[in-house]
Image (cartoon, rainbow, N blue to C red):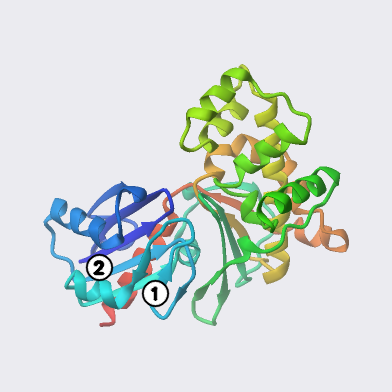
Amino acid sequence: MLLAGDIGGTKTHLAMFSLAEGPRRPVVEAVFSSAHYTDLADMVREFMAQTQLPIEYACFDVAGPVAGGRAQLTNLPWSVDAPALTSELKLKRVWLLNDLQATAYSVPQLTPSDLETINKGESTEYGAIGVIAPGTGLGEAFLVWTGSTYMAYASEGGHTDFGPNNDSQMELARFLLDRFGHAGYERICSGIGIPNIYDFYRERGGGVESPLLAQRLAAASDRTPLIVQAALDAAHPDPLCVATMEMFVSVLGAEAGNLALKVLATGGIYLGGGIPPRILPLLRTGRFMEAFTNKGRFSEMISKIPVHVILTQAALIGAARYGLERMSSQ
């Protein structure tokens, strides 16, 4: 039996998988609040006690760079060490993947029902594929065809320098530089970035904050869900939140286009993470694709690249696929 886990800065999804059922059919699964545990081992022990199922192998994807079977998570104060976990949990082998690498591994197995298409485009057979995922942070990865299968590779492209495309974005970049000393895409296109955009509009953009919303935001441990909900309120959308999410969508579209150019993703761009499925109405307005295709001489070429939103637990599928494939060869 394989234990697979998608470890995020906010929540962790653990599940058991068998070779017979494959990576799309977990035997049992559960979701945990990451911040409630001091480390991954404590969480896994609790899950193992709940399930009472025998485990021989484990594969975890983590929100941070992985090197030598070890990772320091970017948005969670955990260090994860595969050899140490193998010993501590008495397993035969533990594998670690970057969370976006795991999401990328799932892409070839996704079905049309797992996706919402933003741009149909014209996919090239065996073309490279890009994955960009705004969740707690902003992850990026890509896949390339090896001649027999797609191999997934991790990236930390979400931390690259933000490139403004208009005056408002120029001002946002200055705001972020003043606040953090660096203006990277994750400071905008992520769960931790959305409040930064909101603060920018409230403090420098001339926006008027709703007193009631201000009170709710002040009491919230995480302001992002409130901002998103207020922007999507069909009856009474909050103007400041609408402006925030419009900026978010534009910058996300531009960076997705950047990724498409960098890896020449003629096989498509896939939007993962927890945020895109929740803001589909905003992604469908045309604002995203306008920014995605705003690439000068390459605008026509990039307009033909398919763009899809992933609607399922892709990282967990990818981690399970990776672990099961290696488990079967042991």
Q: Position of residue 214 (x, y in %)?
A: 59, 25
Question: For the C terminus, which image quadrant?
Answer: bottom left
Rate crowding at label 1 as few (under 14), some (14 to 19) or many (20 or more) other CA atoms within 10 Å. Answer: some
SS category of the residue bearing label 2:
loop
Q: Position of residue 208 (x, y in %)?
A: 72, 24
Q: Is residue 70 left or right of residue 254?
A: left
Task: Tell me if residue 309 comes above or below residue 232 in the rendering.
Answer: below
Q: Is residue 221 left or right of residue 160?
A: left
Q: Is residue 11 left or right of residue 273?
A: left
Residue placed most toward the observer, 106 or 213: 213
Tell me which numbered mark, 1 or 2, is placed earlier along the sequence: 2
Residue at position x 20%, y 54% from top? 47
Task: Tell me if residue 274 comes above or below residue 315 in the rendering.
Answer: above
Q: Amino acid at mark 1?
A: Arg
Do the residues bearing badges 1 and 2 touch, measured as CB atoms within 8 Å? Answer: no
Residue placed most toward the observer, 262 or 148: 262
Q: Which residue position is annotated with label 1?
A: 70
Q: Amino acid at mark 2?
A: Leu
Front tag of 1 and 2: 1
Residue at position x 20%, y 66% from top? 1
SS category of the residue bearing label 1:
strand
Q: Which residue position is annotated with label 2?
A: 19
Within the image, what quadrant is residue 182 found in? bottom right
